[in-house]
C-alpha cells in the first residue's frame, strides 16, 4: 500500500488480490475514456494557432494526439496533418496547399520543421513590409502644401506667412 498513489488507495485497499484491485481500478476509470476522448477530440477540432508560436501550437496538438492514443483512439498521421494545416492562418496558405498537393504524405516531424522555417520567414518579412508604409507617410506629410511647418517664420517664432519688408523705400527729397 505504500507504493500506491493516495488518490486510488481507497479503491484497492479492500481488494483480496491484485486481480481484484485491478478490476476495481478498471471499472472506475474505464468508463471515463469515452467522455475523455470526446473532450480531446472537441479540443483538437477547435484548436487554432493564433496567437501562439508554431512551437506552442505543435506541442499542444502533439499532446492532444498522444492523449487520444493513450485513451485508445489514436489519430492517423493524415488526420493529424490535416488538423494541423486546418488550424493555421492565411499566412500559411501557400505552404498548406503545397503540403496537401504532395504525392507522398508528410510526417509530423517534417511538417514541424517546415512550419518553423515558414514562421521565421514571415517574421523577417513583416518589418520589410512596414518600412515603405512609414516612409511613404513621412514623405506625404513633408510634401503636403498645407503642412503646418510651411508657414513658420523664424524671425518672430510665429506661424503665418512670412512678410517681406521693402528695402527700397522712396524718400521725397526736394
Image (spheres, rainbow, N blue to C red):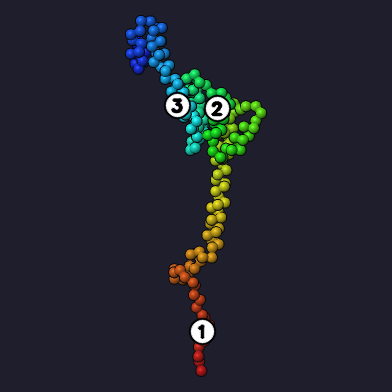
Residue shown at the point (55%, 44%) measured from the top left: 126
- Please give the residue where the numbered disc 3 appears in the rendered image: 39
Q: How far is disc 2 from disc 3 in space, using C-alphas?
A: 16 Å
- Please give the residue where the numbered disc 1 appears in the rendered image: 169
Q: Position of residue 25 (x, y in %)?
A: 39, 13
Q: Where is residue 168 in the image (x, y as percent from the top left)?
A: 53, 82
Answer with the quarter of the image where residue 30 lies: top left
Task: Reply above or below: 134 against 89.
Answer: below
Q: How far is disc 3 from disc 1 in space, using C-alphas?
A: 94 Å
Q: Which mark is residue 80?
A: 2
Residue shown at the point (54%, 31%) measured from the top left: 84
Q: Which mark is residue 149?
A: none
Answer with the quarter of the image where residue 91 lies: top right
Q: How far is disc 2 from disc 1 in space, using C-alphas?
A: 90 Å
SS assignment at label 3: helix
Please rate how many residues cluster around mark 2, counting C-alpha atoms within 10 Å: few if below 14, some from 14 to 19, many from 20: some
Amino acid at each position: 500500500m505504500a507504493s500506491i498513489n493516495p488518490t486510488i488507495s481507497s479503491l484497492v485497499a479492500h481488494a483480496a488480490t491484485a486481480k481484484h484491485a485491478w478490476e476495481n481500478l478498471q471499472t472506475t476509470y474505464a468508463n471515463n475514456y469515452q467522455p475523455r476522448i470526446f473532450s480531446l477530440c472537441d479540443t483538437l477540432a477547435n484548436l487554432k494557432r493564433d496567437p501562439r508560436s508554431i512551437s506552442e501550437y505543435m506541442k499542444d496538438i502533439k499532446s492532444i494526439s498522444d492523449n487520444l492514443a493513450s485513451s485508445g483512439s489514436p489519430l492517423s498521421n493524415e488526420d493529424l496533418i490535416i488538423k494541423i494545416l486546418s488550424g493555421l492562418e492565411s499566412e500559411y496558405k501557400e505552404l498548406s496547399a503545397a503540403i496537401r498537393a504532395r504525392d507522398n504524405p508528410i510526417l509530423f516531424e517534417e511538417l514541424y520543421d517546415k512550419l518553423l522555417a515558414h514562421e521565421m520567414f514571415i517574421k523577417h518579412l513583416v518589418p520589410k513590409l512596414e518600412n515603405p508604409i512609414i516612409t511613404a507617410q513621412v514623405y506625404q506629410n513633408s510634401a503636403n502644401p498645407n503642412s503646418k511647418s510651411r508657414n513658420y517664420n523664424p524671425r518672430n517664432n510665429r506661424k503665418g506667412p512670412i512678410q517681406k519688408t521693402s528695402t527700397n523705400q522712396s524718400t521725397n527729397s526736394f
